[in-house]
Image (cartoon, rainbow, N blue to C red):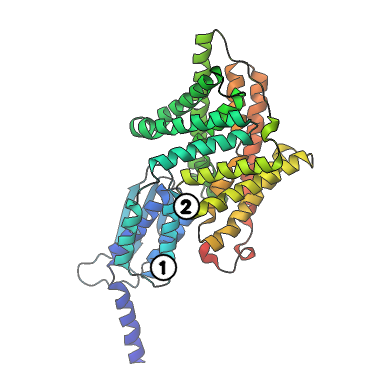
């Protein structure tokens, strides 16, 4: 009995040799910091921080996570309290909302399982977290290309022809040159958001006036899609579904602010153009038959979704599966609307549920959080066209049409919310007996 007790004590001491009490919680907080600033949902941040702390013998019941802050407190459990080591710990970190880089979320997620499986110690975990934190984002040229391809792909999704897609692609390229070179460096989030949408819309109008592009509305809708705040919107929904109400409403508010900035920028562009040319442009909804075939629509959704996977910083090996998921969701939407006479709201509900289910299934073999695929795959269903038409009609003082477009966009957004919640409520055992990859 005494020998067993000594071995048990020795095992606990060996566990603590990798770092003291404060070190453990600092590593857990560092992991949480990286996750939160790169777009992870609150429940994942809490789970990974607790997993790291518990493995090294620290009580992990006192992590409080907000959308832009982490409160870390704890007390010693298995950790030896001898010497000058503290037995309690408290730390508060402010984490500003920044550009998303989901590859870092994937890397920290995998690191946490390496820790819990005993593959690495505390010192190595700290070093790996530093490498993950300091890893460079996607090269500028790659982000610019992703914006262009995303704009061109979604221009086709929302009814543009080949020339419209080419114009949207060019504007998308130029837009991200402005975003990376000016907006993200020198402008605040609100001013930058307005200027981004203003720049994109003015470039689209310029292209249309010189004969580059047939449907101005579809070119603008495609061009502003890289600006849509899909990440805070989806994460806000997931946080609300997980009962993280403060974080959920904060992220949804951030998403609504992003939509508002886009609307203001588009409206200012039309007002400026109208002042130069003596009146508001007259636009109408059109669907070009050149790209309306189901297979072409699925291909366009694939290109647009894969391009957004690039913009969100997902690892390159996940571009194709993300694109496939987006294409499947959009194809289901079109089939329900065209063949089954379903309403856009019903079709969106079914398609968003399917996208979320497939994302959870794909998370297992690809060893990536389902969030990574979901954030990209849901974009073809986002009511970007509704936001544009609401803004256009409002600017043109067509208030009845503006309210109709805005209400339809709201209903579609609610359908996406319900679809995600329904799919996330399904028990994980349906997808795999191994919970560690989700």
2 vs 1, front mark: 2
Q: Residues within 10 Å of mark 2 (few under 14, many from 20)?
A: few
Q: Residue furthest right?
A: 340
Q: Which residue is mark 1?
A: 114
Q: Is residue 61 visible?
A: no
- The image quadrant that residue 75 belongs to is bottom left
Q: Does 199 sit left or right of 57 as displayed? A: right
Q: Secondary structure at mark 1?
A: helix
Give the residue number, with chain letter if any, for mark 2: 316
The percent coordinates of residue 293 (x first, y second) are 71, 38
Badge 1 crowding class, 10 Å Cα cut-off, few under 14, some 14 to 19, many 20 or more, is some
Above or below 343: residue 198: above
Instruction: State the CA–CA distance, disc 2 to disc 1.
Output: 22 Å
- Identify which residue is drawn at 51% across, 28% down: 262
Which residue is located at x 32 percent, y 56 percent? 131
How many discs mark residues in the rendered view? 2
* SS of the residue under disc 2: helix
Task: In this rendered view, identify the residue nearer to me: 50 or 397.
Answer: 397
Ranked by sequence position, the earlier of labels 2 and 1 is 1
Can residue 331 be seen at all in this image of the molecule?
Answer: yes
Q: Are marks 2 and 1 in contact (CB under 8 Å)?
A: no
Relative image position of residue 155 (x, y in whole percent): 59, 33
Q: Which image quadrant: the N terminus? A: bottom left
Give the farthest residue toward the top.
Answer: 278
Which residue is more in the foreground, 120 or 71? 120
The percent position of residue 437, horizontal first and vertical second, equals 52, 63
Q: Residue at x 64, y 58 (%)?
A: 426
């Amino acid at each position: 009995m005494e020998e067993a007790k000594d071995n048990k004590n020795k095992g606990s001491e060996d566990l603590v040799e990798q770092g003291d009490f404060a070190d453990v919680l600092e590593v857990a907080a560092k992991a949480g910091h990286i996750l939160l600033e790169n777009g992870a949902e609150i429940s994942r941040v809490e789970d990974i921080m607790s997993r790291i702390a518990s493995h090294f013998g620290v009580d992990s019941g006192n992590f409080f996570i907000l959308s832009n802050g982490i409160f870390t407190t704890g007390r010693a459990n298995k950790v030896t309290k001898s010497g000058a080591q503290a037995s309690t710990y408290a730390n508060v970190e402010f984490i500003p909302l920044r550009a998303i880089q989901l590859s870092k979320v994937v890397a920290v997620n995998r690191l946490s399982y390496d820790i819990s499986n005993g593959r690495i110690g505390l010192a190595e975990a700290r070093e790996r977290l530093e490498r993950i934190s300091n890893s460079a984002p996607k090269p500028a040229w790659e982000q610019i290309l992703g914006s262009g391809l995303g704009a061109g792909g979604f221009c086709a999704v929302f009814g543009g022809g080949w020339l419209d897609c080419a114009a949207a692609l060019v504007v998308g390229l130029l837009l991200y040159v402005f975003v990376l070179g000016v907006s993200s460096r020198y402008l605040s989030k609100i001013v930058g958001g307005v200027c981004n949408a203003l720049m994109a819309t003015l470039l689209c109008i310029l292209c249309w006036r010189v004969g580059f592009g047939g449907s101005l509305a579809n070119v603008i809708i495609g061009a502003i899609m890289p600006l849509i705040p899909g990440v805070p919107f989806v994460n806000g929904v997931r946080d609300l579904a997980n009962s993280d109400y403060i974080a959920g409403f904060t992220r949804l508010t951030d998403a609504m602010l992003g939509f508002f900035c886009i609307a203001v920028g588009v409206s200012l562009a039309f007002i400026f153009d109208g002042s130069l040319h003596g009146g508001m442009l007259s636009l109408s909804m059109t669907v070009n038959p050149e790209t309306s075939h189901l297979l072409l629509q699925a291909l366009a959704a694939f290109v647009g979704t894969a391009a957004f996977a690039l913009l969100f910083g997902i690892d390159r090996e996940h571009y194709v599966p993300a694109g496939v998921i987006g294409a499947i969701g959009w194809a289901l939407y079109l089939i329900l609307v065209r063949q089954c006479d379903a309403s856009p709201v019903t079709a969106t509900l079914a398609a968003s549920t399917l996208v979320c289910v497939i994302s959870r299934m794909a998370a297992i073999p690809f060893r990536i959080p389902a969030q990574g695929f979901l954030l990209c795959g849901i974009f073809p269903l986002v009511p970007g066209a509704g936001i544009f038409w609401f803004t256009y009609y409002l600017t043109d003082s067509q208030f009845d049409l503006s309210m109709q477009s805005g209400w339809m966009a709201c209903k579609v957004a609610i359908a996406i919310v319900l679809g995600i919640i329904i799919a996330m409520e399904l028990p994980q055992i349906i997808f795999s007996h191994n919970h560690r990859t989700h």
